[in-house]
Amino acid sequence: MLPDGLIDQIAAGEVVERPASVVKELVENALDAGARRIRVELRDGGNDFIAVIDDGYGMTPANARLALRRHATSKITSQDDLERIGSFGFRGEALPAIASVSRLRLLTRPRAEETGHEVRVEGGEVILDRAAGCPVGTRIEVANLFAQIPARRKFLKKPATEWGHAHDWLMRLALSLPGVHFEIIRDDREVGLWPATEDPGARIGAVLGPDVGSRLIPVTWEERGGRVEAWLSPPDQTRANTQGLYLYVNGRPVRDRLVRHAVLEAYRDWLPRGRYPVVVLEITVDPTDVDVNVHPAKWEVRFAEPRMIHSLVRHAVREAMSGRNYLIAASPTLASGGNRPRPSGDQRAQEPIASYLKPADTPIHSAPESRPASMSRVSEPLWTDPSLETVRGTEGVSRSGQGDPLEGERALSSLPLLGQMLASYLLLEADDGLILIDQHAAHERVLYERLRANWLDGAVPKQGLLIALTVELDPLAVVALSDDAALVGALGFEVEPFGEEAVVVRAIPALLSGQDPAGLVRDLAEELSASEAGAGEALRAQPDRASTRLIPAVDRLFATLACHSARRFGDHLPIEEQRAILEGLDSIPWAQSCPHGRPVARRIPRSEIERRFGRT
């Protein structure tokens, strides 16, 4: 039989991963105790001190002692209660597990008592148990987390990183509980104040910022006993990763793969590849239809009818989007002779370019020997889309993206430029037909290759800003920029932390001048946050052109910066800019797609044009 102290430490390994885990357990206990006001204090990112103060029911001396024993809980009394769990916590492991790996002080008083009670525990042993004066509610302090387990403490991250994880979870919880007042203190300074409100939209704006919250689209959808209440970003409000997905089941924050897949599947027709929405989505179902007891930290859940949940979420999102004309209606293809309605702006960016050119278009391709040997290898697209890789002709023959090269290997800029079509494509006259250039994909490819080339040459020209710009970011984003400051500088940015939730931007890459510096820095921070640790060091250790492509995280960073700086679908370009894009394509290693997988150019052979006019 293992000693009790060792059993508690094993339990702590499941429940207490880092300071944010302690904050999560203590705040959930406060909510289960009916708290309407919660104050959270952290020092040194929570590594040295955490305090959670609430105005909940409080505990009697006997219950305070009992709460520090394993498997002691007042939230369930029988096996039947496990079928309808309505509280955040119910295992009775959190407090004794935390107390076994820290110094814990519990101070509590129920409303019916005139005095409170204090219990102190060190390493799982009670060292003080006495009456004490305190307000109604409970205060729990946790100091020196993992101090008695050096092997665990050494794996804690920097205070700023640990703070970022705690703050992220508090944000997620506060979004779903607008009626609870939250006050967040970091190193004796107030960094978060979210007053209670009856308006969920107001709470979302307070937590995520008014610029985000004011644009989210509210939707309510009910289906087969389930209900979704959500706030969804429009297609032009996106992020570079999935950190903007705030998902809840019966009020509980979750990281459920089923729900996330349903959201992204519903958004698929509106967002470009590699971009993700901002979503606050609450699912309400009967407690008997969801099992929340499948993960020690209760991040994951299991649904009795996963297909129904997936359908519920997908329909809710599509209902919000389709009512605002974001979805492009299906229309006949050119092959059938139908009239295609003219899409506008970003809507065109969602349609595969191949669909405009069916049934028999062939991609152009440059001969490898026309480029220097070191530049002849073409990068693989970061994301692939079968609809862009294969186009079927009327004869039923599949022509892959490796089509025949143009005879004579003429530069694109030397071909007659007929003009811009639909404010989206450049139309060229070739010897054997027409060539259509996707202006956004082409410009994106040029910027991407030049960013890479500048970085590999060790000299990314910078463009200083006339006035330094302050950009507000999530704490984790600030940490990401600070931790990889050398890579950020090597990419041509000058960024300095400005407090805990902002940075000052003094310069951006000269190649991207004219773009919104705040947007570029946000995208850079999001890509660094999503990348594996040490990506910058790995890149600097392998400064050759071939190895750069082997690090997807950094390649995605180049692709993201290029995508958001390139000219868009629907932009009317003067003739000079049209020619500049063609000259840019001639100056880089040829690739048939942009970094995100969309074709750069397609050819309509003369034979196909003549066939359509009955001349063959």
Image (cartoon, rainbow, N blue to C red):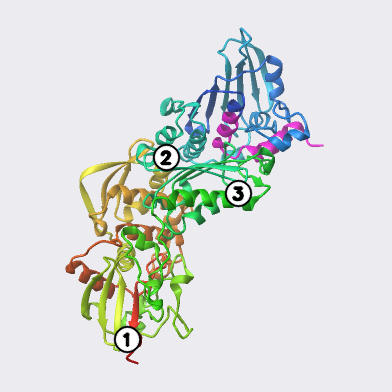
Q: How many marks?
A: 3
- Please provide the residue range marked out in magenta: 1-28
**Vertical side of 321 occupied by 99: above or below:** above
The answer to whether residue 366 of the structure is visible from this angle is no
Residue 478 seen: yes
2 and 3 marks in contact (CB < 8 Å): no
- CA distance for labels 2 and 1: 61 Å
Could you tell which of marks 2 and 1 lies nearer the N-terminus?
Answer: 2
Residue 422 appears in which quarter of the rendering? bottom left
Helix, strand or loop status at disc 3 = helix
Kind of residue at badge 1:
Phe
Q: Residues within 10 Å of mark 2 (few under 14, many from 20)?
A: many
Horizontal side, residue 302 vs residue 608: left or right? right
Mark 3: few/some/many CA within 10 Å (<14, 14-19, 20+): many
Q: Residue furthest top?
A: 114
Q: Amino acid at mark 2?
A: Pro
Horizontal arrangement in the rendering, residue 393 relative to residue 106 (left or right): left
Q: Amino acid at mark 3?
A: Ile
Q: Quadrant of residue 149?
A: top right
Q: Is residue 23 magenta?
A: yes
Report the residue marked by disc 1: 613
Q: Nearer the viewer, residue 321 or 102?
A: 321
